[in-house]
Amino acid sequence: MHRPLATIWPGTVWATQAKHAVHLTFDDGPDPVVTPWVLAELGARGMSATFFVVGDQAAKHGDVLRQVAESGHALGGHTMAHEHGWRTPTATYVQSARASLDVVAPHRRSGTPLFRPPYGKFTRAQASALAPRAKLVMWDVLSGDYAAKGPRGAVAVLRRLQRQTRPGSVVVFHDSAKCGDVLRQVLPAYLDWLAARGWTSCALDA
């Protein structure tokens, strides 16, 4: 658990107390090719996840956004254009974050809205401004799919996931075109590994 960061950003969620489940999350979509594939893999195993979508991407691919919601998964905001909180003025960042929450609102299930900062980086002021309107979700397991290359990289990602995942973990993947090749090599094996341990994945708004 990232205790020092949890102190800097009070109220952020890093993991849960789930006993037999983890919480898979997918950032930076929706993508018209990768996201439907992810939905099929999750659906084949009866698992649910949380998708933190970039507002501009969601506007381009509204049909995919609807597909995510209709498949029973949770949706959260991820700013409109993947802004880096440390490099963006507070007012500008908060406006973008709130706009991304508005994009997913018509498709979101009941409960507290969810938001994740791109790169996992926002300031205390930005977090404080957003906290009254959304649950701020971080993670305790980062797959590293965005940095992996080729079969060896995919093997390293899978091993890292298996080593670090615990019940209640919030796990980050990316359903983007950039990560599609590695995701196809890693996700099915990881989902099967979870199932073999008697674990599942649950959406964070469940």
Image (spheres, rainbow, N blue to C red):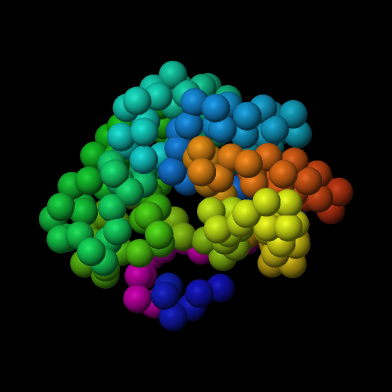
Q: Quadrant of the N terminus?
A: bottom right
Quarter residue 171 falls in = bottom right
Total number of numbered labels?
0
Is 78 situated above or below 139? above
Is 27 situated above or below 40? below
Quarter residue 10 falls in = bottom left
Is 39 situated above or below 101? above
Main SS of the magenta part reads loop
Q: Is residue 98 left or right of residue 43?
A: left
Residue 190 in sight from this viewpoint? yes
Q: Percent x, y for residue 132? A: 27, 54
Residue 26 in sight from this viewpoint? no
Q: What residue is rendered at 75% in x and 62% in y?
A: 159
In the rendered image, residue 147 lying in the magenta stretch gets the answer no
Specify the farthest residue to the bottom.
4
Q: Percent x, y for residue 148? A: 61, 56
Q: What residue is rendered at 44% in x and 26% in y?
A: 65
Q: Is residue 160 left or right of residue 4?
A: right
Q: Percent x, y for residue 167? A: 70, 60
In the rendered image, residue 13 lying in the magenta stretch gets the answer yes
Q: What residue is rendered at 39% in x and 22% in y?
A: 62
Give the camera-side residue of 43 and 11. 43
Q: What residue is rendered at 56% in x and 32% in y?
A: 34
Magenta range: 7-19
Give the camera-side residue of 200 and 144. 144
Specify the farthest residue to the top.
63
